[in-house]
Amino acid sequence: MITTLTLNAALDKTYYLQTLSIGQTNRLRDVHIEPGGKGINVAKVLHSLGLEVTAGGFIGGNNGKVISALLQDRGVGHEFIGIQGESRTCLTIIDNEREEETEILESGPNISSEDWEKICHFTDAAAKKSTIMTLSGSLPQGVPADGYGQLIDIIKQNGSKAILDSSGAALRYGLEKAPFAVKPNERELKQWLNKETLSLSEALEAGKMFIQKGIQYVCLSLGKEGALFFTRDEVFHVKAPVVNAVNTIGCGDAMVAGLAAGFYQNLPARDVILLAAACGSANAMMPQAGQVALTDLEELRKQVVVKKIDNILS
Protein backbone atom coordinates (compact mmCIF):
# COMPACT_ATOMS: atom_id res chain seq x y z
CA MET A 1 0.00 0.00 0.00
CA ILE A 2 0.96 3.67 -0.44
CA THR A 3 0.04 6.30 2.14
CA THR A 4 0.09 10.01 1.38
CA LEU A 5 0.32 12.62 4.13
CA THR A 6 -1.20 16.08 3.73
CA LEU A 7 -0.69 18.12 6.89
CA ASN A 8 -2.34 21.21 5.38
CA ALA A 9 -5.29 19.80 3.43
CA ALA A 10 -7.48 22.18 1.45
CA LEU A 11 -10.79 22.57 -0.26
CA ASP A 12 -9.66 23.61 -3.74
CA LYS A 13 -11.93 25.92 -5.70
CA THR A 14 -11.15 26.69 -9.34
CA TYR A 15 -12.84 29.73 -10.91
CA TYR A 16 -12.93 29.88 -14.71
CA LEU A 17 -13.15 33.38 -16.24
CA GLN A 18 -12.95 34.68 -19.78
CA THR A 19 -10.62 37.34 -18.40
CA LEU A 20 -9.77 38.55 -14.88
CA SER A 21 -10.43 42.30 -14.40
CA ILE A 22 -8.72 43.61 -11.25
CA GLY A 23 -10.84 46.11 -9.30
CA GLN A 24 -14.00 45.24 -11.22
CA THR A 25 -16.89 42.79 -10.95
CA ASN A 26 -16.05 39.42 -12.50
CA ARG A 27 -18.65 36.82 -13.48
CA LEU A 28 -17.64 33.18 -13.55
CA ARG A 29 -18.00 30.95 -16.57
CA ASP A 30 -17.63 27.86 -14.39
CA VAL A 31 -16.50 26.75 -10.91
CA HIS A 32 -15.14 23.42 -9.72
CA ILE A 33 -14.55 22.18 -6.17
CA GLU A 34 -12.03 19.44 -5.36
CA PRO A 35 -10.46 17.86 -2.28
CA GLY A 36 -6.97 19.32 -2.33
CA GLY A 37 -3.60 19.80 -0.75
CA LYS A 38 -0.53 18.35 -2.42
CA GLY A 39 -0.66 14.91 -0.79
CA ILE A 40 -4.35 14.53 -1.55
CA ASN A 41 -3.59 15.33 -5.20
CA VAL A 42 -0.94 12.58 -5.10
CA ALA A 43 -3.51 10.14 -3.69
CA LYS A 44 -6.07 10.99 -6.39
CA VAL A 45 -3.55 10.28 -9.15
CA LEU A 46 -2.45 7.02 -7.53
CA HIS A 47 -6.10 5.98 -7.29
CA SER A 48 -6.51 6.74 -11.00
CA LEU A 49 -3.53 4.46 -11.67
CA GLY A 50 -5.36 1.64 -9.92
CA LEU A 51 -3.04 1.42 -6.92
CA GLU A 52 -4.04 0.87 -3.30
CA VAL A 53 -3.63 4.23 -1.56
CA THR A 54 -4.73 5.89 1.67
CA ALA A 55 -4.75 9.67 2.06
CA GLY A 56 -3.88 10.76 5.60
CA GLY A 57 -3.20 14.01 7.43
CA PHE A 58 -5.25 16.66 9.21
CA ILE A 59 -8.75 17.94 8.39
CA GLY A 60 -11.12 20.12 10.37
CA GLY A 61 -14.40 22.03 10.31
CA ASN A 62 -16.95 22.12 7.52
CA ASN A 63 -14.26 22.21 4.85
CA GLY A 64 -12.77 19.05 6.34
CA LYS A 65 -16.13 17.31 6.12
CA VAL A 66 -16.46 18.30 2.45
CA ILE A 67 -12.90 17.09 1.70
CA SER A 68 -13.69 13.71 3.25
CA ALA A 69 -17.04 13.43 1.45
CA LEU A 70 -15.53 14.28 -1.94
CA LEU A 71 -12.79 11.67 -1.50
CA GLN A 72 -15.46 9.16 -0.52
CA ASP A 73 -17.40 9.98 -3.70
CA ARG A 74 -14.26 9.37 -5.78
CA GLY A 75 -13.48 6.10 -4.04
CA VAL A 76 -10.15 7.34 -2.67
CA GLY A 77 -9.26 5.68 0.63
CA HIS A 78 -8.60 8.15 3.45
CA GLU A 79 -7.95 8.23 7.18
CA PHE A 80 -7.57 11.72 8.63
CA ILE A 81 -6.88 13.13 12.08
CA GLY A 82 -9.70 15.53 12.98
CA ILE A 83 -8.66 18.89 14.43
CA GLN A 84 -10.52 21.82 16.03
CA GLY A 85 -9.64 24.39 13.36
CA GLU A 86 -11.05 24.83 9.86
CA SER A 87 -9.21 23.29 6.90
CA ARG A 88 -8.20 26.00 4.47
CA THR A 89 -9.73 27.00 1.15
CA CYS A 90 -7.40 27.50 -1.81
CA LEU A 91 -8.61 29.43 -4.84
CA THR A 92 -7.27 29.13 -8.40
CA ILE A 93 -8.47 31.65 -10.98
CA ILE A 94 -8.10 30.57 -14.60
CA ASP A 95 -7.96 33.51 -17.03
CA ASN A 96 -8.77 31.92 -20.39
CA GLU A 97 -7.96 34.99 -22.47
CA ARG A 98 -4.49 35.57 -21.00
CA GLU A 99 -3.90 31.84 -20.39
CA GLU A 100 -2.86 32.69 -16.83
CA GLU A 101 -3.47 31.01 -13.47
CA THR A 102 -3.70 32.99 -10.23
CA GLU A 103 -3.61 31.20 -6.87
CA ILE A 104 -4.97 32.60 -3.60
CA LEU A 105 -4.03 30.31 -0.71
CA GLU A 106 -5.21 30.46 2.89
CA SER A 107 -2.56 29.67 5.52
CA GLY A 108 -4.59 26.95 7.23
CA PRO A 109 -5.40 26.02 10.85
CA ASN A 110 -3.15 25.86 13.88
CA ILE A 111 -2.03 22.38 14.91
CA SER A 112 -1.80 21.66 18.64
CA SER A 113 0.94 19.58 20.27
CA GLU A 114 -1.70 16.90 20.94
CA ASP A 115 -2.62 16.84 17.25
CA TRP A 116 1.05 16.50 16.34
CA GLU A 117 1.43 13.52 18.65
CA LYS A 118 -1.59 11.92 16.95
CA ILE A 119 -0.10 12.31 13.46
CA CYS A 120 3.18 10.82 14.67
CA HIS A 121 1.28 7.79 15.99
CA PHE A 122 -0.68 7.59 12.73
CA THR A 123 2.56 7.70 10.72
CA ASP A 124 4.07 4.95 12.85
CA ALA A 125 1.07 2.69 12.23
CA ALA A 126 0.82 3.56 8.52
CA ALA A 127 4.53 2.95 7.91
CA LYS A 128 4.18 -0.59 9.24
CA LYS A 129 1.75 -1.46 6.42
CA SER A 130 2.88 0.89 3.63
CA THR A 131 5.71 0.27 1.18
CA ILE A 132 5.80 3.98 0.26
CA MET A 133 4.76 7.11 2.16
CA THR A 134 4.69 10.56 0.57
CA LEU A 135 5.10 13.81 2.53
CA SER A 136 3.84 16.74 0.50
CA GLY A 137 3.23 20.45 0.87
CA SER A 138 3.59 23.14 3.46
CA LEU A 139 3.60 22.68 7.21
CA PRO A 140 0.59 24.23 8.96
CA GLN A 141 0.95 26.58 11.89
CA GLY A 142 1.98 24.86 15.11
CA VAL A 143 3.90 22.00 13.46
CA PRO A 144 7.63 21.95 14.34
CA ALA A 145 9.92 23.25 11.60
CA ASP A 146 11.57 19.82 11.54
CA GLY A 147 8.18 18.09 11.40
CA TYR A 148 8.88 16.27 8.16
CA GLY A 149 12.25 15.25 9.51
CA GLN A 150 10.57 13.67 12.53
CA LEU A 151 8.11 11.81 10.33
CA ILE A 152 10.86 10.59 7.99
CA ASP A 153 12.64 9.09 10.99
CA ILE A 154 9.45 7.26 11.98
CA ILE A 155 8.86 6.01 8.44
CA LYS A 156 12.42 4.73 8.06
CA GLN A 157 12.39 3.03 11.46
CA ASN A 158 9.40 0.97 10.30
CA GLY A 159 11.03 -0.12 7.03
CA SER A 160 8.94 2.08 4.74
CA LYS A 161 10.22 4.54 2.12
CA ALA A 162 9.57 8.29 2.39
CA ILE A 163 9.19 10.60 -0.61
CA LEU A 164 9.47 14.30 0.34
CA ASP A 165 8.05 17.21 -1.67
CA SER A 166 8.19 20.46 0.27
CA SER A 167 10.02 23.79 0.47
CA GLY A 168 11.83 26.16 2.81
CA ALA A 169 12.74 24.99 6.29
CA ALA A 170 10.49 21.93 5.98
CA LEU A 171 12.53 20.77 2.99
CA ARG A 172 15.86 21.66 4.59
CA TYR A 173 15.20 19.73 7.79
CA GLY A 174 13.69 16.84 5.84
CA LEU A 175 16.74 16.52 3.60
CA GLU A 176 18.98 16.04 6.64
CA LYS A 177 17.06 12.84 7.47
CA ALA A 178 17.85 11.33 4.04
CA PRO A 179 14.40 10.30 2.79
CA PHE A 180 14.20 7.65 0.09
CA ALA A 181 13.41 10.26 -2.58
CA VAL A 182 12.88 14.02 -2.93
CA LYS A 183 11.28 16.16 -5.65
CA PRO A 184 12.16 19.87 -5.39
CA ASN A 185 11.03 22.16 -8.20
CA GLU A 186 13.09 25.01 -9.64
CA ARG A 187 11.73 27.63 -7.22
CA GLU A 188 12.32 25.41 -4.19
CA LEU A 189 15.82 24.53 -5.37
CA LYS A 190 16.76 28.20 -5.84
CA GLN A 191 15.44 28.92 -2.36
CA TRP A 192 17.48 26.06 -0.90
CA LEU A 193 20.64 27.26 -2.69
CA ASN A 194 19.87 30.95 -1.95
CA LYS A 195 20.16 31.83 -5.65
CA GLU A 196 18.02 34.07 -7.86
CA THR A 197 18.89 32.14 -11.01
CA LEU A 198 19.80 28.51 -11.57
CA SER A 199 21.86 27.01 -14.35
CA LEU A 200 21.65 23.41 -15.45
CA SER A 201 25.17 22.77 -14.14
CA GLU A 202 24.22 24.20 -10.73
CA ALA A 203 21.14 21.95 -10.65
CA LEU A 204 23.35 18.97 -11.45
CA GLU A 205 25.67 19.85 -8.56
CA ALA A 206 22.70 20.26 -6.21
CA GLY A 207 21.34 16.86 -7.16
CA LYS A 208 24.77 15.35 -6.54
CA MET A 209 24.80 16.91 -3.07
CA PHE A 210 21.41 15.38 -2.28
CA ILE A 211 22.65 11.94 -3.31
CA GLN A 212 25.74 12.40 -1.11
CA LYS A 213 23.39 13.02 1.85
CA GLY A 214 22.19 9.44 1.45
CA ILE A 215 19.01 10.13 -0.53
CA GLN A 216 18.56 7.32 -3.03
CA TYR A 217 16.53 9.12 -5.71
CA VAL A 218 16.34 12.82 -6.55
CA CYS A 219 13.95 14.37 -9.09
CA LEU A 220 14.54 18.06 -9.85
CA SER A 221 11.75 19.57 -11.94
CA LEU A 222 13.18 22.57 -13.79
CA GLY A 223 10.33 24.04 -15.82
CA LYS A 224 11.31 24.61 -19.44
CA GLU A 225 14.62 22.78 -18.87
CA GLY A 226 12.67 19.58 -18.13
CA ALA A 227 13.77 17.52 -15.15
CA LEU A 228 16.86 15.82 -13.78
CA PHE A 229 16.56 12.39 -12.17
CA PHE A 230 19.41 11.08 -10.02
CA THR A 231 20.08 7.61 -8.67
CA ARG A 232 23.21 6.61 -6.77
CA ASP A 233 24.82 5.54 -10.06
CA GLU A 234 23.07 7.42 -12.88
CA VAL A 235 21.67 10.81 -13.89
CA PHE A 236 18.97 11.31 -16.51
CA HIS A 237 17.87 14.50 -18.25
CA VAL A 238 14.14 14.29 -18.95
CA LYS A 239 12.07 16.26 -21.45
CA ALA A 240 8.31 15.91 -21.13
CA PRO A 241 6.17 16.19 -24.26
CA VAL A 242 4.60 19.51 -25.19
CA VAL A 243 0.87 19.35 -24.48
CA ASN A 244 -2.14 21.62 -24.73
CA ALA A 245 -2.14 22.60 -21.05
CA VAL A 246 -5.53 23.32 -19.51
CA ASN A 247 -4.44 23.76 -15.87
CA THR A 248 -0.86 23.26 -14.67
CA ILE A 249 -1.78 23.30 -10.96
CA GLY A 250 -0.90 19.93 -9.44
CA CYS A 251 1.53 18.77 -12.13
CA GLY A 252 4.30 18.41 -9.54
CA ASP A 253 1.96 16.35 -7.35
CA ALA A 254 1.19 14.12 -10.32
CA MET A 255 4.94 13.64 -10.81
CA VAL A 256 5.28 12.58 -7.17
CA ALA A 257 2.46 10.09 -7.72
CA GLY A 258 4.32 8.73 -10.75
CA LEU A 259 7.50 8.35 -8.70
CA ALA A 260 5.62 6.60 -5.90
CA ALA A 261 3.89 4.28 -8.37
CA GLY A 262 7.15 3.44 -10.11
CA PHE A 263 8.97 2.67 -6.86
CA TYR A 264 5.99 0.68 -5.57
CA GLN A 265 6.03 -1.45 -8.72
CA ASN A 266 9.85 -1.86 -8.57
CA LEU A 267 10.31 -0.37 -12.04
CA PRO A 268 13.82 0.34 -13.38
CA ALA A 269 14.98 3.93 -12.81
CA ARG A 270 14.43 4.99 -16.42
CA ASP A 271 10.86 3.66 -16.35
CA VAL A 272 10.16 5.40 -13.04
CA ILE A 273 11.01 8.82 -14.46
CA LEU A 274 9.15 8.06 -17.70
CA LEU A 275 6.02 7.39 -15.68
CA ALA A 276 6.51 10.44 -13.44
CA ALA A 277 7.02 12.81 -16.38
CA ALA A 278 4.02 11.38 -18.23
CA CYS A 279 1.84 11.81 -15.11
CA GLY A 280 2.85 15.47 -14.84
CA SER A 281 1.99 16.13 -18.47
CA ALA A 282 -1.28 14.17 -18.26
CA ASN A 283 -2.34 16.27 -15.26
CA ALA A 284 -1.73 19.48 -17.24
CA MET A 285 -4.28 18.32 -19.83
CA MET A 286 -7.04 18.00 -17.23
CA PRO A 287 -9.16 20.85 -15.83
CA GLN A 288 -8.48 20.02 -12.17
CA ALA A 289 -5.38 19.15 -10.15
CA GLY A 290 -4.74 15.53 -9.24
CA GLN A 291 -6.34 14.04 -12.34
CA VAL A 292 -4.90 11.97 -15.17
CA ALA A 293 -6.58 10.11 -18.01
CA LEU A 294 -5.04 6.69 -18.55
CA THR A 295 -5.46 6.99 -22.32
CA ASP A 296 -3.43 10.23 -22.27
CA LEU A 297 -0.87 8.71 -19.94
CA GLU A 298 0.04 5.76 -22.15
CA GLU A 299 0.49 7.97 -25.21
CA LEU A 300 2.50 10.58 -23.30
CA ARG A 301 4.83 7.99 -21.84
CA LYS A 302 5.92 7.13 -25.38
CA GLN A 303 6.75 10.80 -26.03
CA VAL A 304 8.91 11.47 -22.97
CA VAL A 305 12.59 11.88 -23.93
CA VAL A 306 15.11 10.52 -21.41
CA LYS A 307 18.86 10.95 -21.94
CA LYS A 308 21.52 9.59 -19.62
CA ILE A 309 24.19 12.05 -18.45
CA ASP A 310 27.57 10.42 -17.88
CA ASN A 311 30.20 10.91 -15.19
CA ILE A 312 28.41 13.58 -13.12
CA LEU A 313 28.46 11.41 -9.97
CA SER A 314 32.10 10.40 -10.24
Image (cartoon, rainbow, N blue to C red):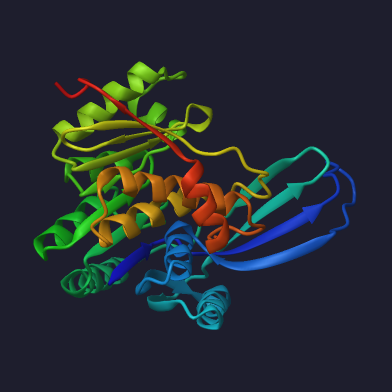
Location of residue 130 with respect to 255 vertically, above or below: below
Q: Quadrant of the N terminus?
A: bottom left
Q: Nearer the viewer, residue 98 or 271?
A: 271
Is 74 left or right of 210, judged from the image as shown? right
Regarding residue 143, the answer to whether it shows in the image is: no
Location of residue 222 with respect to 277 vertically, above or below: above
Q: Position of residue 293 (x, y in %)?
A: 57, 62
Q: Nearer the viewer, residue 150 or 265?
A: 265
Is 22 left or right of 184, judged from the image as shown? right
In the image, what residue occupies the spot 43% across and 60% down? 42
Q: Quadrant of residue 264?
A: bottom left
Q: Position of residue 274 (x, y in %)?
A: 39, 45
In the image, what residue occupies the spot 31% across and 55% down? 262
Q: Position of residue 227 (x, y in %)?
A: 41, 34
Q: Nearer the viewer, residue 10 or 245?
A: 245
Q: Quadrant of residue 270?
A: top left
Count the marks. 0
In the image, what residue occupies the spot 41% across and 17% down? 199
Q: Nearer the viewer, residue 225 or 86?
A: 225
Q: Position of residue 122 (x, y in %)?
A: 25, 73
Is 223 left or right of 310, judged from the image as shown? right
Regarding residue 197, the answer to whether it shows in the image is: yes
Q: Quadrant of the C terminus?
A: top left
